[in-house]
Amino acid sequence: MTRINKWVKTIGFLPLLLAALAIVGIVLADLSYSGHVAGSGLWGGFVSIFIRSILGVSSWFSSSYGLGIIVFTVFVRFLILPLMVYQVDSMKKMQVLQDEIKVLQDTYPGRDTESRQLLAAAQQQLYKDRGISPFASMLPLLVQMPVLIALYQGIHNSPVLRSGSFLWLNLGHQDPYLILPILAALFTFGSSWLSTQANPQQNAMTKAMPYVFPFLILFTALAVPSAVSLYWVVGNLFQMVQTFFLQNPFKMRREREEALALEKEKARKVRKAQRAKKRKKR
């Protein structure tokens, strides 16, 4: 019970509730589909569950495969939402330590083996003292990637899903008007830009990410069926909204400015007290 309370406190009740509802939705969707989807091996069976679930959701909307892809993609995003909250929380904790890590790097500036070992030991001790795991932010990414890849392969490899139409789209062919690839690129840019703006410590690579990833998504979406592009649009839109609420750069920037102003005010009071003390001594 203590561990559950800790998870609820760290992640929040709402993301856990949405994840639980997503699991229920996926199970019900899978049960709604009465047909058979072939899948060989452990991974093939995992992907076939995703295909059956999408087809099950589609049956709720009179076999509209486009709506099935949209709703099921939202289910999956809700499913991994607690992991994303945990990842963002870990990243924020790591950002708080950046100034202290920089001090350690200045303390051990050497590039020889001994200096690097001392720096690594000091950093590990700092993480231990603060109760932070430097690899905690990587774990959610490792967990969610198989889920997202299975969803992608389920859509891409299912002839049934790609045989339908949705709005102006033939789901088995590329978007003739290029609307989905452009939207996927724009939403990717939005989520990447929000994420990098929330990070006060930026290098050349992090600054380039919001501009590189959208082009990769754009050119890839131009070459895949619109069923996959639709999945990317919905997923990237969800990611952008999620990033805004979890890593709102405007709120985080304001909080950093307020914290900096508070530190300056404390420093000013200390200097004032020291000057008053000196005057008394005279």
Image (cartoon, grey):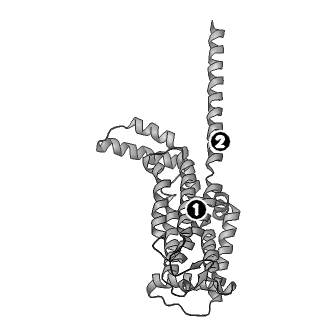
Location of residue 41 in the rendering, given as x and y in whole percent from the top left corner: 44, 86
Residue closest to the eye, 25 or 100: 25
- Single out the residue that lies furthest toward the left: 112
Expressed as whole percent of the image width and height from the top left, the position of residue 147 reads 52, 73
Identified by mark 1, the residue type is Met
- Disc 2 designates what residue? 254
Tags 2 and 1 in contact by the CB under 8 Å rule? no
Where 18 sits versus 241, above or below?
Answer: below
Residue occupying the point 55% across, 44% down: 96
Residue lying farthest to the bottom in this orientation: 35
How far apart in space, not on screen, are marks 2 and 1 (Cα)?
A: 23 Å
Q: Nearer the viewer, residue 163 or 83?
A: 163
The residue located at (64%, 88%) in the rendering is 31
Provide the secondary structure element on which disc 1 rests: helix
Find numbered disc 2 in the image and state the secondary structure of the residue it sits on: helix
For mark 2, does the 10 Å Cα neighbourhood hold few (<14), some (14 to 19), or many (20 or more) residues? few
For marks 2 and 1, the one nearer the N-term is: 1
- Left or right placement of residue 40 versus residue 13 in this view: left
In the drawing, does residue 103 fall left or right of residue 280? left
Q: In the rendered image, which residue does mark 1 sit on? A: 84
Q: Residue furthest top?
A: 282
- Quarter of the picture containing the C terminus is top right
Residue 175 on image: x %, y %: 53, 74
Q: Residue at x 41, y 35 (%)?
A: 106
Q: Position of residue 12 (x, y in %)?
A: 68, 60
Q: In the image, what residue type sits under mark 2?
A: Arg
Q: Nearer the viewer, residue 126 or 269?
A: 269
10 Å crowding of disc 1: few (<14), some (14-19), many (20+): many
Residue 163 in the image: above or below residue 123: below
Which of the two discs, 2 and 1, sits closer to the camera? Answer: 2
In the depicted view, which residue is nearer to us: 206 or 181?
181
- Please state, as top left, top right, bottom left or bottom right, where the N terminus lies in the image: bottom right
